Image: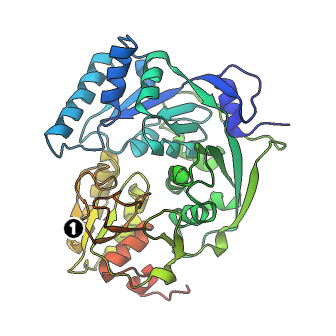
Amino acid sequence: MGMTMSEKILARASGRERVRPGDLVLAKIDFAMGHDLTIPPAGRIMREEMGADRVWDPERVAVVQDHFQPAKDAASAALGRLTREFAREMGVSWYFEVGQGGICHTVLPERGLVLPGELVVGADSHSCTYGALNCFATGIGSTDLACVLALGELWFRVPESLKLVYHHRLGPWVEAKDLILHVIGLLGVDGARYRAMEHTGEALGWIDMEGRLTMTNMAIEAGAKNAIMACDEVTEAYLRGRARRPYTPVRSDPDAGYERVIEVDAERVPITLARPMSPADTAPIDAVAGTRLDQVFIGSCTNSRIGDLRRAARVLEGRRVAPWVRLIVTPSSHEVALQAEREGLIRVFLEAGAAWTTATCGACLGGHQGVLGEGEVCLSTTNRNFPGRMGDPGALVYLASPVVAAASAVAGEIVHPAEVVGEPVSA
């Protein structure tokens, strides 16, 4: 029997000819990432408990200031300082300061730091995002990050694989975010627990790299260890001029084994939202339309890349946010913000009555720049809506795509975007 993409990467990284689900392997890491919440504890463990005084390869490490930065209080400033000092003392080549980087899961792909065929770890659960670029990417804790920083290797259990096959093409107004929410609704929040989610099928040919990154980003919301896609023309076009190293793509063998194969007709997937308080509590937009909103948030590592902002701006242009709603727009990187400025998107958001922030994870994790109060209702382009995720445990968060978020900000309630732009809903 052949191997899947995930198995091939773990086999190569552990120096084996082949691996099987359930195998335990000690694998060499190709790239590692930490940020302002995870570098301080990882650095302390590495130096004080492991006795290491340098990272295994400064060229293979990225450190990003993104979660509580710009600092929201003195404690956050201290975390930022410790992160900054660690990166400087260790000579980390890829350090991203406030105003120079952004959200780690946008910055690493856009800078060409995570590549096909590689084994990538990040001390953040949404590090699975990078799998859209044909690498095995997964989140780890700060203790494991300390081991990686010092040694450049880590133990893994080879995961079983789920194969998701997407047929046909997404319909009007339906985006990659709707597709992955639909899948999470089918699987549940633990339906892919410690599995590799392998996304395949002709529908992916119609989804750009930004949309693919959205899909792999939310693998953890189904409990997956990682998500992965094959390297194709879309991947190669994205990496052209970006890739920092040579790379070798992997493909699953025709006779690779899968625990389960799930067929999805993309053409039949409706605009899909997740209702409070779970990403798996999904529903078509008709089931939640009319829900009044206090806040709309367009941001996070899931849906605030330049394409997301372009689509949201097209809905908002010439329109105003409802007077009782606050719309907060957060670009996912400094590069995205610069491009949005060049294209006039920031002006569109500001003229519509939105608040524009620096690139940060702040509102998504209930840190700052968009925290919710008790009883407030928010429509968000983020990836999680568990109790307390964006602030008070009594707040209610719906998850949706950027176009639904923009339209709903104008209407003041959840609405089909076609209604706001004046198109037939059935178009």
Residue 90: image x %, image y %?
32, 17
Q: Quadrant of residue 145?
A: top left
The C terminus lies in quadrant: bottom right
Residue placed at 27% from the left, 29% from the top? 83
Residue 260: image x %, image y %?
75, 53
Q: Quadrant of residue 97?
A: top left
Is 172 left, or right, of 393 in this rendering? right
Residue situated in front as seen by the camera: 186 or 410: 186
Disc 1: which residue: 350
Label 1 environment density (alpha carbons within 10 Å; few <14, some 14–19, many ≥20): some
Whether residue 325 is visible = yes
Residue situated in front as seen by the camera: 14 or 146: 146
Q: Is residue 233 above or below residue 185?
A: above
Q: Quadrant of residue 305?
A: bottom left
Residue placed at 18% from the left, 33% from the top? 78
Is 144 left, or right, of 315 in this rendering? right
Whether residue 209 is visible = no
Residue 18: image x %, image y %?
77, 27
Residue placed at 46% from the left, 41% from the top? 109
Please state which amino acid type lies under the numbered disc 1: Leu
Q: Is residue 154 above or below residue 250?
A: above
Question: Hey, which residue is sitting farthest front in the picture?
Answer: 394
